[in-house]
Image: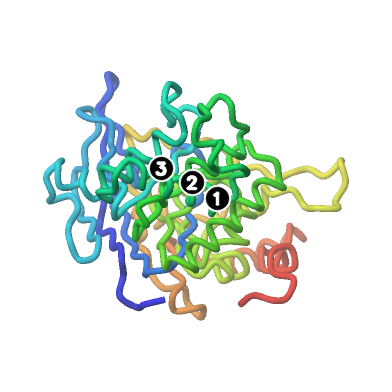
Amino acid sequence: MSDTPLLKVEDLSVRFHTRHGAAHVVNGISYDVAPGEILGIVGESGSGKSVHTLAIAGLLPGPRAEVTQGRVLFRGQDLLALTPDERRRLRGREIGMVFQDCMTSLNPVMTVGAQISEALVLRMGLGRRAARRRAAEILDAVGVSEPVRRLDDYPHQLSGGMLQRVGIAMGICCEPKLLIADEPTTALDVTVQAQILALIYRLCREMGMTVLLITHDLGVVARTAHRTAVMYAGQLMEIGPTASVFTDTRSAYTLGLLRSQPVPGAGRRQRLAQLPGSPPDLRALPSGDPFAPRNPFATTRDAAERPPLRPVPGGDPRHFVAAWYDLPQAFAAQIAATGGPVHPTDLRQRYYPQGAA
């Protein structure tokens, strides 16, 4: 992977105007992604994962949604400074999208072949016959059985796994440099999920494609992403190499997400840890860390002052956290006082049985 970022998000903020006031759904997030890298983006529903990627692609539902500040540099070009027509020309050709629910994102009255071919004609300049041949090749590449016959099928004739593959085919058909995959394995059984993840990883490796992988599933991120970004209330709480984020966790929010995962082999009586409280009202965000009211390790400074992303002390220099507290020290003190739960470092064997790499 190149050290020069393909995508660089700088201080991006997005606001939704509602009848009850302005909701600040993305609040000053910054990160970059290198060519050929998979960045996993995780967090609770409403944390801003999908919204900020819609802002990157220029697909925010206007006029109630607006970008209030920031820049999005794609190959050095600020996407937010482009006209709507200029951004439309980039979509599909340079930036591909795999939407969360392919059953609703695909046109129900157009065949699969017509929908893929349309993008190839408009973005790649292929003729109708050449586009149809290319569409069949792409369906075959993503593992759709009998691809030529499937070109004439309508979305309702396909299974959930097939629809996800068609969605990926549409996202990659023009060989984009950046693929935004929003919950590409939602509602799929574990076998199909594994196939879809392996497909995305293979396409990333073979095509040199950069992927933003949005998901709620930490296991998906652990198996697929090179780096992981954790979002809460429209802010980045932690970001770094996936192995470091999972085994040297420094944000209490990330810790809560990890502890809420079921443990294989623990039996039916296991109790999952829960995050206390509720996410903040996005119309009236607190001045400090938005997770502080739910965080047993928060300091008075966390409640009063929003912490910036900064390198974790004594850890991987590529690992950043937004916190004024020191989680390992605070957790060690809690264990000494109460004999509390294990530190996520002890979860290493769950996700990295051969050791963190």
In the image, farthest residue toward the front: 129
Relative side of 237 to 305, left or right: right
Residue at horizontal 26 percent and vertical 37 percent from the top: 15
Instruction: Confirm or deny contact between disc 1 and disc 2 (CB under 8 A).
Output: yes
Q: Crowding near pointer 1: few (<14 within 10 Å), some, many (20+)?
A: some
Q: Position of residue 222 (x, y in %)?
A: 61, 61
Q: Nearer the viewer, mark 1 or mark 3?
A: 3
Q: CA distance from mark 3 to mark 2?
A: 6 Å
Which quadrant is home to the N terminus? Answer: bottom left
| Residue topped by disc 1 | 140
Relative side of 184 to 172, left or right: right
Instruction: Confirm or deny contact between disc 3 and disc 2 (CB under 8 A).
Output: yes
Residue 338 visible, this orientation: yes
Please tell me whether residue 20 is drawn above or below residue 43 in the rendered image. Answer: above
Q: Amino acid type of disc 2? A: Ala
The mark total stands at 3
**First reached walking from the N terminus: tag 1 or tag 3:** 3
| Residue topped by disc 3 | 132
Q: Amino acid type of disc 3? A: Arg
Q: Nearer the viewer, residue 33 or 91?
A: 91
Secondary structure at numbered mark 1: helix
User: How has the structure been colored for display?
Assistant: rainbow
Q: Amino acid type of disc 1? A: Asp
| Residue topped by disc 2 | 136
Q: CA distance from mark 1 to mark 3?
A: 12 Å
Secondary structure at numbered mark 2: helix
